Image (cartoon, grey):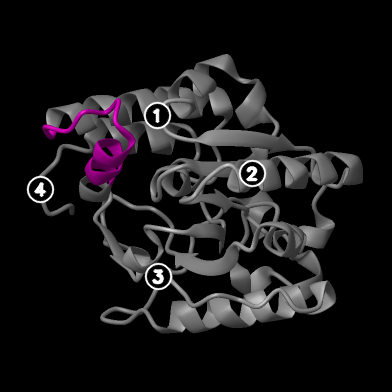
Amino acid sequence: MNDNNIDCSQLNALIKEYGGVDSYTTEQAATIFGLLCKMVSELGYNPDIRSEFFEGVCSIFNLEITNRDKYLSGKYILVPNHVSEFDGMLFGTILSNMMVVAKTDWVTNPHLNSFVEKYFSVVGVVRKESSSGITVLKNCVRHLEGLQDGAVTIFVQQTIADIDNTTPEDVASGACFIAKRTGAQIIPVYAEQISTEYPTRIVFGEPISCGDKKEFGGEWLKRELELRDSISNPEARPPKLCEKHRKPISQRGF
């Protein structure tokens, strides 16, 4: 139960109707985000202002964030785990001047864009298409080059998945390309699956050295497991995933 006795019954009903926090479509996302804006407004925050929208979301989902204050200024590449369709919205608003790398549906849906464009930039990638990936990475570089303080979020698993069901080979290394060209630091972040019933813990880690791109996946997984293990009282909740997202990433057709 959230600390502010917020009525989340309508939100929870929508999530259940749509199949869970890892299952809804972009059209359904637009409906959910519209409801979130209404809830944030009812809490006394202005949902048109990124920082106030995020504060409202913190209240609704009982977000407990560790070490974020280290990264409020400067240039960073956040590489969180990915366990929910809410993750784009969450990491898009967690820091200012954010660009989120997302599946193309997030870019081509005008209803969703009317929400997203108020808070952060988004660039769409066609997964498993190398030319699309290169274009996206160049867009991320341009975004960071024009800022004194700002960030990019890349879901390096490339899809929703439990880190226990992720291999180093599943992890994209594009963050290294961006880091080498901009000087931005790569920051691992572990996030529990978002919930209105339990605290949702998010832990920012220490920077990852770019190093060899071939070694990045293994290092990222190691850091994510360490961040998850740092969550206690109680220990981190395992994500509840639909059948598709429980499959090994290499066996999915995207």
Type of amino acid under label 3 = Val
How dense is the environment of label 1, judged by Cα within 10 Å: few (below 14), some, or many (20 and up)?
Answer: many
State the image coordinates of residue 4 (x, y, percent, origin top left). Answer: 10, 48
Reading the chain from its start, which is encountered first: label 3 or label 4?
4
Report the quarter where the N terminus lies.
Answer: bottom left
**Residue type marked 1:** Ile
Based on the picture, tell me whether residue 152 belongs to the magenta stretch. Answer: no
Callout 3: 10 Å neighbours few (<14), some, many (20+)? many
Foreground label between 3 and 4: 3
Instruction: Name the secondary structure under disc 1.
Output: helix
User: Which residue lies under the disc numbered 4?
Assistant: 4
Q: Is residue 47 magenta?
A: yes
- 2 or 3: tag closer to the N-terminus: 2
User: What residue appears at the point 23 percent right and 36 percent down from the top-left corner?
Assistant: 9
| Residue carrying label 1 | 32
- Counting from the top left corner in percent of width and height, residue 186 is at 59, 67
Residue type, mark 2 in image = Val
Rounded to the nearest angstrom, the CA distance separating label 1 from label 2 is 20 Å
Instruction: Measure how far apart labels 3 and 1 are at the Cα level.
Output: 25 Å
Mark pair 3, 4: CA separation? 22 Å
Could you say whether the residue bearing mark 3 is in a helix, strand or loop? Answer: strand
Q: Nearer the viewer, residue 73 or 251?
A: 73
Residue drawn at (65%, 78%), measured in percent from left and top? 209
Badge 2: how crowded within 10 Å, few (<14), some, or many (20+)? many
Using the image, tell me which numbered label, if any, was put on residue 101. Answer: 2
Task: Please indicate whether residue 44 sits to the left or right of residue 214 in the image.
Answer: left
> Of the residues under marks 4 and 1, which one precedes in the sequence?
4
